């Protein structure tokens, strides 16, 4: 059983936590949310997706257990519902993900590059990247349609190094949304795939596919 969980949290509370825990990257909302969620295991989701809404931020994602409403306070709101599909049920999902490829040398990851780099058709490049990763769910989910909805570039802050010596670097990453429709074949395998998410940077709010 999965729980589709929604949190609405004042932005001021998220920023305050991030400034206390990691002030170098507090200006990056996805990083700040990562910090806020890491301190609240009983309501934290993974994967998840967030969007700012006025003075609050709304976070939606998956949990394997029902969240504890008592764990949030100070103007935060939490809601959830059990999510279960049976074999033969049709569903449409929307996901926001970061389509990058790891470049390795000598078995070691040296860098990441945009999956559309060097390609004439970026929509086709991102769709191919996504389809490669949807192969894992093919035995549990018959995919009828897969469409790229939006493509954007986002500036983010990422920290590298050790606790003794770290540095922050600004990066520009591709952020793509897509809709995937199909019919469930095996509900347990399908739910396990939803919890795993798609692609890198899931701790920063990417890779969640949610019903729409």
Image (spheres, rainbow, N blue to C red):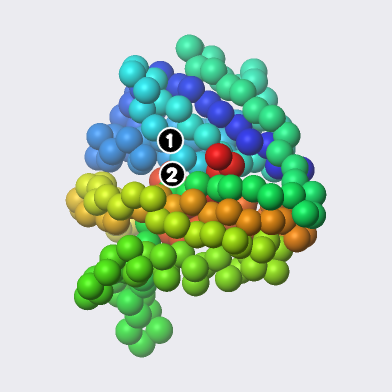
Of 3 and 70, nearer the camera is 3
| Mark 2 closeness class: few <14, some 14–19, many ≥20 residues within 10 Å | many
Say what secondary structure mark 1 lies in.
strand
Q: Which residue is mark 2?
A: 205
Q: Is 129 placed left or right of 39 in the picture?
A: left
Q: Which sits earlier in the primary sequence, circle 1 or circle 2?
A: 1
Residue visible at 77% across and 59% down in the picture: 186
Looking at the image, which is closer to me, 74 or 165? 74
Q: Which residue is situated farthest in the bottom direction here? A: 106
Tell me where residue 184 appears, x and y as whole percent: 72, 56
Task: Mark 1 and mark 2 in contact? Answer it, CB < 8 Å.
Answer: yes
Q: Position of residue 99 (x, y in %)?
A: 37, 62
Dot label at residue 50: 1
Element at label 2 = loop
| Mark number displayed over residue 112 | none
Image coordinates for residue 33, horizontal then vertical, percent? 41, 35
Q: Nearer the viewer, residue 6 or 91?
A: 91
In the image, is residue 192 above or below residue 51?
below
| Residue plotted at (29% across, 56% down) | 174
Image-based side of 109 in relation to 63, left or right: left
Look at the image and tell me in which quarter the C terminus lies: top right
Q: Quadrant of residue 139?
A: bottom right
Among the 4 quarters of the image, the one containing residue 16: top left
In the displayed structure image, the side of residue 143 where residue 129 appears, left or right: left
Residue plotted at (23% across, 73% down)? 120
One can see residue 176 in this view: yes
Which of 73/45 is in front? Answer: 45
């Amino acid at each position: 059983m999965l729980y589709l969980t929604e949190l609405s949290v004042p932005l001021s509370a998220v920023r305050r936590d991030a400034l206390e825990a990691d002030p170098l990257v507090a200006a990056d909302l996805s990083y700040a949310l990562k910090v806020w969620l890491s301190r609240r295991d009983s309501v934290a989701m993974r994967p998840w997706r967030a969007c700012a809404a006025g003075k609050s931020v709304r976070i939606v994602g998956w949990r394997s257990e029902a969240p504890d409403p008592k764990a949030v306070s100070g103007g935060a709101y939490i809601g959830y519902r059990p999510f279960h599909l049976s074999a033969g049920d049709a569903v449409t999902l929307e996901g926001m993900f970061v389509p990058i490829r790891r470049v390795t040398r000598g078995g070691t990851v040296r860098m990441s590059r945009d999956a559309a780099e060097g390609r004439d058709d970026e929509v086709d490049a991102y769709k191919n990247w996504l389809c490669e990763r949807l192969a894992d769910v093919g035995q549990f989910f018959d995919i009828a349609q897969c469409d790229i909805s939006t493509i954007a570039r986002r500036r983010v802050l990422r920290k590298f190094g050790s606790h003794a010596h770290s540095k922050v670097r600004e990066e520009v990453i591709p952020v793509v949304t897509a809709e995937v429709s199909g019919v469930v074949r095996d509900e347990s395998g399908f739910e396990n795939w939803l919890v795993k998410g798609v692609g890198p940077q899931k701790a920063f709010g990417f890779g969640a596919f949610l019903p729409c």
